[in-house]
Image (tube, rainbow, N blue to C red):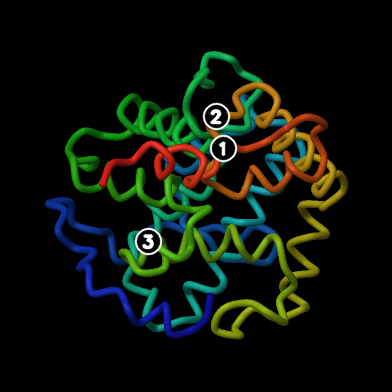
């Protein structure tokens, strides 16, 4: 990912019939000024109910890092900040141990985004969450592990993905160079990284064990090949290409 990705999207972000609030209420979390709406608070409560501590800290750090970076980059400042917040906070519901949220045959991103959409349809005000806004939130979550696509979409999708990606690297490599080491350290002190790497590894490996067919076309397969005995992904050449005609 690089800075050029931030200017390559030509998809407008204002197709929705919902009019953005130009000055939403705010509060400060870990030194970061964030939008503060009833829906965002409900999203945090929903995440707290359905995610473990390491997962919760990850999604909140991802949101805060994305907020800092997007607020610092002119190309992302026009985003729907409530949508960005809710999508970032709910982006990993597909890791939940709540079996009601998890399918037997879908990628974790799709489980997560379907749970998030159901939350928005239940808790969001219908006049504010039209089809376009719901779809935009869906794209933020569904594409958060696919930056080669997500960084060419609407500014909300870009901001969400950038923040999530940032939680896997230090500020020195952050997109746009606007996230400082001091800001990074303050967020990590408030939302500790303890257990993050091991937790992610455990989740990914379990996906390879429980529903391996959902891991073959994405990065989860790399965890299976490295850490799960007997795991062997079916590649495009092994599957579709080998059976194609012509």
Q: Given contact means CB atoms under 8 Å apart, are the residues at marks 2 and 1 in contact?
A: yes
SS at badge 1: loop
Spot occupied by residue 177 in the image (x, y as percentages of width and height) = 61, 85
Q: Which residue is mark 1?
A: 234
- Position of residue 240 in the picture relative to residue 89 (left or right): left
Looking at the image, the residue that sits furthest to the right is 194
Ranked by sequence position, the earlier of labels 2 and 1 is 2
Q: Label 3, label 2: how many angstroms apart (C-alpha)?
A: 30 Å
The tag on residue 67 is none
Q: Label 2, label 1: how many angstroms apart (C-alpha)?
A: 8 Å
Residue at image x 87%, y 48%? Answer: 194
Above or below 182: residue 67: above
SS at badge 2: helix
Q: Residues within 10 Å of mark 1 (few under 14, many from 20)?
A: some
Residue at image x 75%, y 72%? Answer: 170
- Quadrant of the image occupied by residue 165: bottom right
Spot occupied by residue 192 in the image (x, y as percentages of width and height) = 82, 52
Q: Nearer the viewer, residue 77 or 194?
A: 194
Q: Given contact means CB atoms under 8 Å apart, are the residues at marks 3 and 2 in contact?
A: no
- Position of residue 54 in the picture relative to residue 99 (left or right): right
Spot occupied by residue 232 in the image (x, y as percentages of width and height) = 68, 35
Look at discs 1 and 3 and give the one toward the viewer.
1
Q: Which residue is mark 2?
A: 213
Ranked by sequence position, the earlier of labels 1 and 3 is 3
Q: Residues within 10 Å of mark 3 (few under 14, many from 20)?
A: many
Q: Residues within 10 Å of mark 2 (few under 14, many from 20)?
A: some
SS at badge 3: helix
Q: Which residue is mark 3?
A: 156
Spot occupied by residue 4 in the image (x, y as percentages of width and height) = 43, 85
Q: Label 1, label 3: how many angstroms apart (C-alpha)?
A: 33 Å
Look at discs 2 and 1 and give the one toward the viewer.
1
Look at discs 3 and 2 and give the one toward the viewer.
2
């Amino acid at each position: 990912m690089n800075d050029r990705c931030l200017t390559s999207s030509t998809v407008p972000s204002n197709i929705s019939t919902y009019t953005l609030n130009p000055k939403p209420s705010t509060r400060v979390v870990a030194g970061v000024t964030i939008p503060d709406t009833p829906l965002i608070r409900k999203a945090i409560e929903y995440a707290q109910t359905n995610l473990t501590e390491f997962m919760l800290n990850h999604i909140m750090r991802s949101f805060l890092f994305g907020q800092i970076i997007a607020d610092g980059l002119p190309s992302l400042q026009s985003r729907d900040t409530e949508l960005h917040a809710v999508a970032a906070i709910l982006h990993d519901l597909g890791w939940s141990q709540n079996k009601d949220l998890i399918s037997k045959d879908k990628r974790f991103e799709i489980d997560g985004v379907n749970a998030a959409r159901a939350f928005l349809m239940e808790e969001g005000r219908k006049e504010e969450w039209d089809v376009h806004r719901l779809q935009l939130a869906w794209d933020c979550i569904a594409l958060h592990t696919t930056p080669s696509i997500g960084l060419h979409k609407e500014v909300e999708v870009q901001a969400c993905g950038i923040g999530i990606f940032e939680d896997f690297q230090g500020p020195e490599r952050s997109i746009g160079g606007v996230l400082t080491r001091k800001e990074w350290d303050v967020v990590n002190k408030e939302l500790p990284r303890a257990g993050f790497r091991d937790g992610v590894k455990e989740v990914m490996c379990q996906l390879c064990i429980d529903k391996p067919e959902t891991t073959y076309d994405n990065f989860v397969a790399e965890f299976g090949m490295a850490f799960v005995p007997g795991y062997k992904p079916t590649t495009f050449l092994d599957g579709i290409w080998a059976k194609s005609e012509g």
